[in-house]
Amino acid sequence: MPEPIDLRRRHLLAGTATAIAAVSLSGLPWRVQAQEAMPLPDYVKWKTPEALIVHSANTLETHRDAIGTSVITASNRLFVRNNLPAPDASILADREGWTVAFQGVKQPRSLTLAELRSLGVTTVASVLQCSGNGRAFFPHGASGTPWTVGAAGCVFWSGVPLKTVVEALGGVAEGQSFITATGGETLPASLDPKTLIVERSVPLRALDQALLAWEMNGEPLSVAHGGPLRLVIPGYFGVNNIKYVKQLAFTAEQTDANIQKSGYRIRPVGEKGAPDQPSMWEMSVKSWISQPLEQMKAGRVLIQGVAFGGAKAVKSVEVSLDGGQSWRPAPFVGPDLGPYAWRPFVLAVELKPGNYSLASRATDVDGNVQPRERVDNERGYGHTGWEDHAMKVAVV
Amino acid sequence: MPEPIDLRRRHLLAGTATAIAAVSLSGLPWRVQAQEAMPLPDYVKWKTPEALIVHSANTLETHRDAIGTSVITASNRLFVRNNLPAPDASILADREGWTVAFQGVKQPRSLTLAELRSLGVTTVASVLQCSGNGRAFFPHGASGTPWTVGAAGCVFWSGVPLKTVVEALGGVAEGQSFITATGGETLPASLDPKTLIVERSVPLRALDQALLAWEMNGEPLSVAHGGPLRLVIPGYFGVNNIKYVKQLAFTAEQTDANIQKSGYRIRPVGEKGAPDQPSMWEMSVKSWISQPLEQMKAGRVLIQGVAFGGAKAVKSVEVSLDGGQSWRPAPFVGPDLGPYAWRPFVLAVELKPGNYSLASRATDVDGNVQPRERVDNERGYGHTGWEDHAMKVAVV
C-alpha cells in the first residue's frame, strides 16, 4: 500500500505534459567517487566500493548519498568500525561451536551458539551508530576517524534475547549493576590486555532490549560485523555492541579496561578521559539529510534523509530550507520497524534558483528535539546538532 | 525490544546447568550443499552460492533452510526467475535515463527514471513469489521448473507509486480496465514477438498498490531483479512484476501476448491455456516450515517458518507435529512490515524420539485458511496446500 501522497505533488504536476518536462533532476543519487579511493580491505571485499569511504582498514564510512529509502541499510553499504583488526575468517569455520562464558548469573556456565539458538529467537531493527559519527564537524580537530554522517546504518538483527539466556541460567546474581561483555579478538602478548581489550560495560537496564545476534539482514553474521555472534544493544552506541562476544558477565562495577575506564567518555576539550565522566551509552534523537547534496536545477526536488530517536522512538522530523529560520514537517516513508529503527523521510518541494541551507530536526516520542548546536567535547562524540549537519545547496 | 518469550521456554530451561547441556541442536541451519552444484551464472555471481539451487541460467531457487528470521530476504539469497535471458549489465549504465512510455492515460508521454524519481517515493515490503512455487509437489509432473518452496522471498521495494505517476499524467483514460506492462528484453527478430515478449496485464484495481521500483533492500535494483526499473505489484505473483519495464499502458483488454493469453492460466491437467481461465494475479494465504528439515536429536527444538497472506495480510499461523491431527498457534517473530510482507514464525517445542510430520497452516485477516490439499492444475501453479509442504522429520 503506497504511502499517502502529499497533495502538493499533484498540484505541481497535474496539468500539461510540459509541466512534467520541466521537473528538475535531483542529480545522480548513487554517486560514484570521482577521486582515487583506497581499495576495500580483504575482509570487506564483498561490500560495494562506490558506497563507501575507506578511512583505514578498520574504518569504512557510508557515503552520505548512498542510503536509500528502504529503511534497512544493505549490508554491502553498512559502515565498519573495528577497535582492533578483525579476526581471520576462520573464526566462522564452526559457527555453531562458538562458545560464550556467562558469569554473574546464578548458574554460571558456557553455552555454544547452537545451544543459544535453541533457547529462543527474536528480530529487532536498530540503528548502529559509532559514538564519533559527526566528529568531522567539531572545529577543534577531535582525534579519531573524521566521520561525517556515514558511521551509521539501520539493520535487522536476529538472535536470542539476552534476558531469555539469563533466565535459563537462573537469573542475574545478587548485587550486579552492569552487563560487561568481552570481544574475542586476539591481543598482542606483549601488552597489558586492559589497554587494548574490547570489553564494555552497560547498565543493567539494557537487559530489557539486549540480544545475542547471529544474523544480520537475513544472512549469517559476517566477520566484519561481529560474526559468529555479537552482543547487540538496540538504542546504544556501536562500541557497546561487542563483536565475536566470548564472555558476558553481570558485574557490580564497570570493567577497568581502557576502552571503558577512560575511552568513550564525554569531557571538555583538552581533558583526559576518566570513569566519572558520562559513558557513550544511550543514543539521542538525530537526523540528517542524505539528498540532495549538490548543486541542482530549479524545479521540484525531493529532500530525503533519515531520522531516529536513539534509545527512544522518533516521533517526527522537520526540514528547513533556510538554515533553520523556518521549518516544515517531513513525512516518513515506508514501514515503522520499531522504536530502535530509523525512519527515512521525504519532503517534496519546488525550489527556485538561489542558495539554500537544507537542515533537518527530529523529535522523539518524549518530546526531545534535536538541538541546533553541537556540544563540544574532547573526542568529538555524540554530535546531534542540526546546524553542522545542514547542507548548503545551490539551485540554478 | 525483544519479542515476548513463550513461558514454556523458561520452564524447560530454568533449573540446573545440566538441563541446558541436554538441549538439542537443531542441526546446521545454513546448510552447505554437499553434492556438486551448478555454478552461479555470471549475472548473479554476486549471490551466495550455498544459499541457492541453480536449476538453470534463468531459474535459481533459495534453499528451504537458507531463509533466516530477519523478515527480509537478503538480496544475495533471493530466488531468480527470468522468462527471457537477463539483459546485459550495460542496461544499467545510465539508470537515470531509462525511459518508460505511458499510454492509456489522459496525457500519454514518456518519462525518464530521473523524472519518475522527482514525482514521489514510497517503500513497501512484499513477498515476491513465482506462480510455480511448489510445482515439485504436483504428482502429474507439471512442466516447468520444479520449485519446492524457494521461489519466494520478501524484500523492500522503493519507487514511485504508479498512482502518483498516473495522476501527474492526468489520470487513467476512459474505458480502461487493465494495467499492461512490457519488459525491455531484446527479442529475437525471427519470431513473432507475441510468442516471447514479457507483457502482462493485471486488473486496474492493482493501481492501489503498484509502484515503479528502482531500489530493492536499500540498493539500486540489479539486472537480475529487473533494474533499472521494475513494475512491482505487491500481493501479485512474480510474473506480473515486469522487469526493465519500458512501457506501461492502461488498456481496455488484456494483452494478447502468449504469456498472458495462454500462459499463467489455471486449468485442469491436460488442458491448454486459454484467456477464459483464471490468470495468476493475486496470491493466496500460504506458509511453510523452513527448519528443522532433517533428523535431529531429541530435546528442545525451535520450529521456524514463514507465513503470508498474499493480497491480504496474514493474521496467524499454526504448527502441527503430527501431520495435521492437532495444531498449536505459532508466534510471529520481528516487526510487521505491512500487509504484503511475510512474517517469520517460531514455535519452541520439546521433542521425544520418534517420527514427526511437521506442517504449518496460515490464516489471513479475512479468515481464509490455507487448505490441506493442492488444487491439481496443468502447469502446477498456485500451490498452497499445507500437506504437501509438510516435512517428515525423525527425532532420535
Image (cartoon, coloured by chain):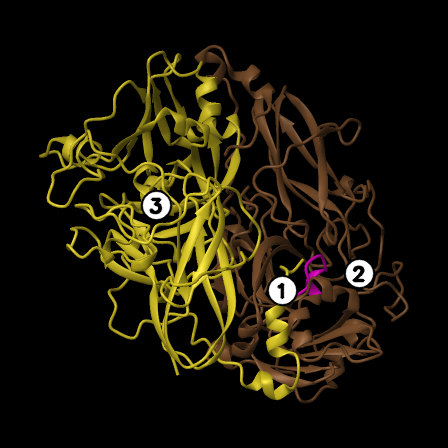
Chain colours: A brown, B yellow
Q: Main secondary structure of the magenta part?
A: loop
Q: Is residue A128 above or below residue B179?
A: below
Q: Is residue B272 above or below residue B68?
A: above
Residue at 76% of width from left, 61% of height from top? A143
User: Are there few (<14), some (14-19), or many (20+) residues within 10 Å of tag 3?
Assistant: many
| Callout 2 secondary element | loop
Q: Which residue matches tag 3?
A: B223
Residue B60 x, y percent position in the rendering: 29, 56
| Callout 1 secondary element | loop
Asked if the stretch drawn in magenta spans residue B30, the answer is no
Residue with the most extreme front position: B325
Residue at 68% of width from left, 42% of height from top? A288
The answer to whether the residue labelled 3 contacts the one labelled 1, judged by CB atoms less than 8 Å apart, is: no
Q: Which residue matches tag 1?
A: B5
Q: Amino acid at mark 1?
A: Ile
Which portion, as a residue range, is magenta? Answer: A232-239
Residue B56 x, y percent position in the rendering: 22, 56
**Which sits in the foreground, B239 or A74?**
B239
Q: Residue B391 appears in which quarter of the rendering?
A: bottom left
| Callout 3 secondary element | helix
- N-terminal-most mark, 3 or 1: 1
